[in-house]
Image (spheres, rainbow, N blue to C red):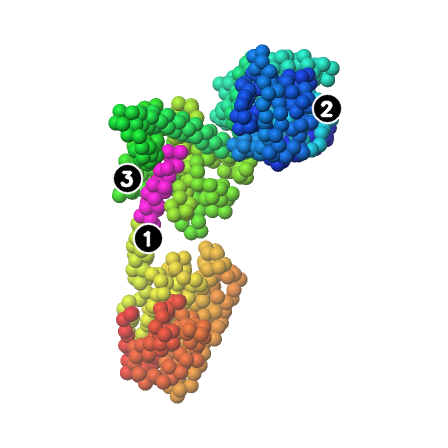
Amino acid sequence: MRRFFRVLMITLTVSVFAFSGLFLIREFTKIRTLINIGDIWSYLALNDSPGARFVEVDPDDFLHSPIPSVGDSLIEIDGHSATRENYFSVFNTKTPAGLSISIVYKSADSLMTTTVQTRSIPILLKIQVVALHGLMISFTVILIIVGLWAFIRRPDSPSVRVLTLFCYSMTLSMLVNRIVIADGYATFQLPDFFYTLMQSLGAFAPAFWLKLQMIFPDPIRFYRRNRILSNVIIYSIPIALSVIYFVEPSIIRIPLLIYWFVFLIAGFIFLLSHGRQAKSFLEKRQTRLVLWGSTPGLSVYLILALLGFIRPEWFFGLSNVIRLTIFNATSLLLLFLPISFAIAIGRYRLLEVVGRVNRGTRFILVSVLVLIAFFFVLYGIGEIVLANLGIESRTPTIAIILILAIGFAPAQRRFHRLIEDRFYPERVRLRTLLSEFLDQRQRSAIGRGFWEELEQKLLDGLGAKRIYPVILKGKPEAFSAECCEFAPFKVTDPLIDTLRSSNHPLPVDELLASNRIPFRDDQKNWFEERNAAVILPLSTSSELTGFLVLSDKKSGEDYTAEELRLLNTLAAQIAMVAENIELLEEKLEKERLEEQLEIARQVQEGLLPRDLPRIEGFEIAARIRFCLDVAGDYYDIAPMKNDRILLAVGDVAGKGVGPALLMANLQASLRTVKDTGLPLPRIMTTINELIVDNTSPELFITLFVAILEPESKKLCYVNAGHNEPILLRKDGSVDRLQGTGMVLGVTSESEYKSSTLELHDGDTLLMFTDGVSEAMNDSSEEFGEERIAEILKRSMDRSLDDILDLIESSVRDYRAGRTFADDFTLLVLRASASGGDFTELE
């Protein structure tokens, strides 16, 4: 069945397109002929029998008196009786302009003879004819496109199939009923069967209209219960009329007019009923939009049909220009019919379109009223100036026109504002309420309080239950709702792209129903849990800072287009305040973070040994430089039992708070196990197991730990993947204390071995981190351990502080004064016969 409907619709589409195309091409040939030939432009009601009545008389057609009047009958044309056939034998596609032709007409009971002269079509009539053809093409193309688009979009929807059939039948009906140029001007003729078939198919337009209103957006109760009966009633009448039209077309006019009138009115009744009984705001908007789009065009169409039937002499007595103007205006109004259906079927931006229609209608009415007022003012002043003051010149009148033209726009705006103030006081109140509030908040935006106050203002002005600000926060860019709650939106989401590009309020139900934007389930649930009704984008300088979600109203009513338009005009101010709040919160957060980091720095510095111990027979000095507020570098000098000294230098991978915390943990662990009596390898194994169990593999530690026995000057050490300390002997030779185990924190199965060496008077041991050796210059070349060793050798006779100063200054010079990219730590120990010495941490 589905395949049958699709094949049927494709066949109908091709047929309607072909019929319409042929018809429009033929009409175009009429226009081209009409523009190029000579003719008379007085309008005659031609018949197959002699005697054609003058419906409109253009004096410019006649070379001399007498000139016929409307109602007179044409008797002869160039010596031939005035039949339709004879008329077009004289005035046809080959008739040139400037040809003089004698005619005889009857006025009252007298026969009069005069001469007409053919001429080109008047410019005003030419504009109207061309415009009508352009509108016919536009109307045809739009109807066919809307019908085809709707069917392609939702081929299985009964209402969409009926809409497509209505568009096609309405196309054919409008074409055959908009013939204003006689067939004799066409360069080719179509068979009578062609017109009969178009008229018969076009007769189904009211039936499809009525059924569409019975099932769109949802079927009415009567149709659901009596589907077969409803279809029989709806379609039997146009089928019967089509049969009659084929058999005896002369008697079809009155029944066809009644049928159109009854079915169109019934459709409007169902449409109004749908609007009142709609189950959702979305359905109400759909029916309201269709009502707005169809009422003007179809109403005028019906009125013209009734006038043509009830008062044909009056209607056809109008001039060609006036009748063509009426036809063009009607065609223009009918263009809104398919457009409104297309938007309603798409279910997207309905409220916005309804708002624009409302504003456009008010604008037109206000402009017309102001123009009427200006006309009476101009007329009155002109009469006073010309009559009472005795001034004959038109200059004062022209000056008055210019003054009024200058004042038209301000008067129009003022009048529009007065109408709003008088008929829509709640909008004025809401605008004032929000504007004053936002003006105050621009100067004092205080976080959460702003959103709470804005919510209260919207509650007072709109009746919204809640608002949910969803603001872009931090990097990576994410959204936060209600100032602190997580919101399931990302900057890459289609919704955010739409809000960034469209920048207008979007009803949530339209977004979900139209399927134009793909939503994830968590986003749909988020909107549903909050009864979200409207999304208001918040942008500053074309940058989306977030959006405001308004819940449904307490009253249970829908938001109006004017309310959303008003909110949209204030969205930039709301966004600016929100941005100020965000900047203020970021500043406060930064200050809090800096304060916390300063405290952390002080705590970390407190963990480092500030007062280095005196070691009999040794000198010792240390230095550490943080590249950030807190460091991942670590050194320690701590007394142990039996007068031994623990020396340690470590480096936690990375920089910042995480490595600093791990460094503190390392220091606490090392100091905890140093006096347990365990051998140094076992101490390292225990610390490694603690780190593996409590940190991720990405955070590992390089560590050099040594136990010094001052009395014997023996140094037992373990190097867990750390930079090899440099041992400068008194004789100038250099040794490296190589690694004896893996870095800490990678695997609990690591094993560590210790090595022991003996220090002699004058020997110097330098321990350092990679912040020293891997410091880079502008060419990305490392400072290197060889340079450190050379500096140490050159300064072996200098004090330890001088050695540290020299290394630090050399590294700074190497980096050309740039700050350190990594933490920088030095610990130096020298065996000295002169006794122990120490220096304070710098």
Helix, strand or loop under label 1: helix
In the image shown, does 3 or 681 lie closer to the viewer?
3
Q: Amino acid at mark 2?
A: Asp
Please report whichever mark, 3 or 2, sits nearer to the chain's N-terminal start: 2
Q: Residues within 10 Å of mark 1 (few under 14, many from 20)?
A: few
Q: Position of residue 15 (x, y in %)?
A: 70, 30
Residue named by callout 1: 590
Up/down of 82 relative to 806, above or below:
above
Residue named by callout 3: 439
Query: As drawn, which residue projects farthest toward the bottom?
Result: 731
Please report whichever mark, 3 or 1, sits nearer to the chain's N-terminal start: 3
Residue 293 belongs to magenta span: no
Up/down of 646 relative to 191, above or below:
below
The quarter of the displayed image where residue 413 is located:
top left
Q: Amino acid at mark 3?
A: Asp
Q: Evaluate if marks 2 and 1 touch, with contact meaning CB atoms under 8 Å apart.
A: no
Quadrant in which the C terminus is drawn: bottom left
Helix, strand or loop under label 3: helix
Q: Position of residue 779 (x, y in %)?
A: 44, 74
Closer to us: mark 3 or mark 1? 3
What's the mark number on residue 192? 2
Q: Evaluate if marks 3 and 2 touch, with contact meaning CB atoms under 8 Å apart.
A: no
* 16 displayed left or right of 825: right
Please report whichever mark, 2 or 1, sits nearer to the chain's N-terminal start: 2
What secondary structure predominates along the stretch shown in magenta? helix
Task: Residue at 54% x, 21% y: name it.
Answer: 66
Task: Residue at 36% x, 70% y: name it.
Answer: 818
What's the mark number on residue 136? none
